[in-house]
Image (cartoon, grey):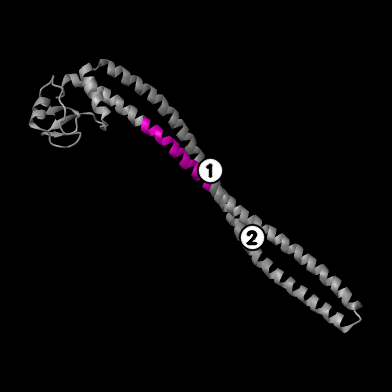
């Protein structure tokens, strides 16, 4: 059974560990928020990339339409010139230019057919991606709001836990409190106060000396593990 003088310290330890747990959780909040912000940014960028690709193809299609109209008008103009041509060389040159314009027009029409097929597929992909992104955004915004609420609750809990720690310190024996603080100062992780069971410290899980074991068995002795320095009591 624990030394009665250790009981207030066990209560203090509980509050101190609660404070440590809350502080750790709060320290993780910025990274968690950053992760959510990055996920939201990536979600938006994926959709923006798809939309940009679609817009570029729309621009290309309009440019091809414009070029095709220009070629058609040029063919009409060249044909008019062809009728008026007096020399064979001029007639043939106009014929070659008309044929080149027609070939370019045919190539544009083929290119437009491929482009229209791509536009149809990408339009459907953008529509689907827009729905997916809306769902992702709603989910990520909800998680961000939940994280903000969690942070608010943790900060309130921390105030309470720190107040409980102050109250618990006021009840503890000064000598035992000094020993407890000394163990914490050397960086030992919780728990700071542990039992020794079958000669083994339950904090570091190493076997203690016979002297430490015997001292830990008798209430009123400020016993410490001679391996890790934690405050201990002995359990038969």
Q: Is residue 33 left or right of residue 23?
A: right
Q: Is residue 135 visible?
A: no
Residue segment shown in magenta:
23-42
Tag 2 residue: 119
Report if residue 37 lies within the magenta region.
Answer: yes
Q: CA distance from mark 2 to mark 1?
A: 26 Å
**Residue at image point 63% right, 56% down:** 54
Q: Nearer the viewer, residue 22 or 109?
A: 22
Residue 94 position (above or below residue 34): below
Image position, residue 141 (x, y; %): 51, 39
Image position, residue 27 (x, y; %): 40, 34
**Residue at image point 90% right, 79% down:** 85
Q: Nearer the viewer, residue 132 or 9?
A: 9
Query: Quarter holding the N terminus?
Result: top left
| Snapshot quadrant of residue 181 | top left
Q: Is residue 23 left or right of residue 112?
A: left
| Snapshot quadrant of residue 176 | top left
Tag 1 residue: 137
Image position, residue 65 (x, y; %): 74, 63
Q: Tell me the crowding category of disc 1: few under 14, some 14 to 19, or many 20 or more residues within 10 angstroms, Cα based.
A: some
């Amino acid at each position: 059974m624990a030394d009665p003088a250790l009981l207030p310290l066990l209560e203090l330890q509980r509050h101190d560990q609660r404070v440590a747990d809350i502080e750790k959780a709060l320290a993780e909040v910025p990274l968690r928020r950053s992760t959510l912000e990055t996920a939201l940014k990536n979600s938006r960028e994926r959709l923006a990339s798809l939309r940009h690709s679609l817009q570029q193809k729309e621009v290309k299609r309009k440019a091809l339409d414009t070029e095709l109209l220009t070629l058609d008008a040029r063919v009409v103009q060249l044909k008019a010139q062809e009728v008026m041509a007096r020399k064979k060389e001029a007639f043939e040159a106009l014929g070659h230019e008309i044929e080149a314009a027609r070939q370019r027009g045919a190539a544009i029409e083929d290119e437009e057919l491929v482009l229209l097929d791509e536009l149809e597929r990408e339009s459907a992909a953008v529509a689907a991606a827009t729905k997916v992104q809306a769902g992702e955004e709603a989910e990520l915004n909800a998680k961000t709001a939940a994280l903000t609420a969690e942070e608010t609750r943790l900060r309130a809990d921390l105030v309470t836990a720190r107040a409980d720690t102050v109250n618990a310190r006021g009840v503890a024996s000064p000598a035992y409190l000094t020993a407890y603080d000394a163990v914490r100062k050397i960086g030992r992780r919780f728990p700071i106060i542990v039992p020794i069971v079958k000669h083994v410290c339950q904090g570091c899980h190493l076997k203690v000396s016979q002297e430490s074991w015997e001292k830990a068995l008798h209430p009123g002795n400020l016993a410490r593990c001679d391996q890790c320095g934690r405050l201990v009591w002995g359990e038969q």
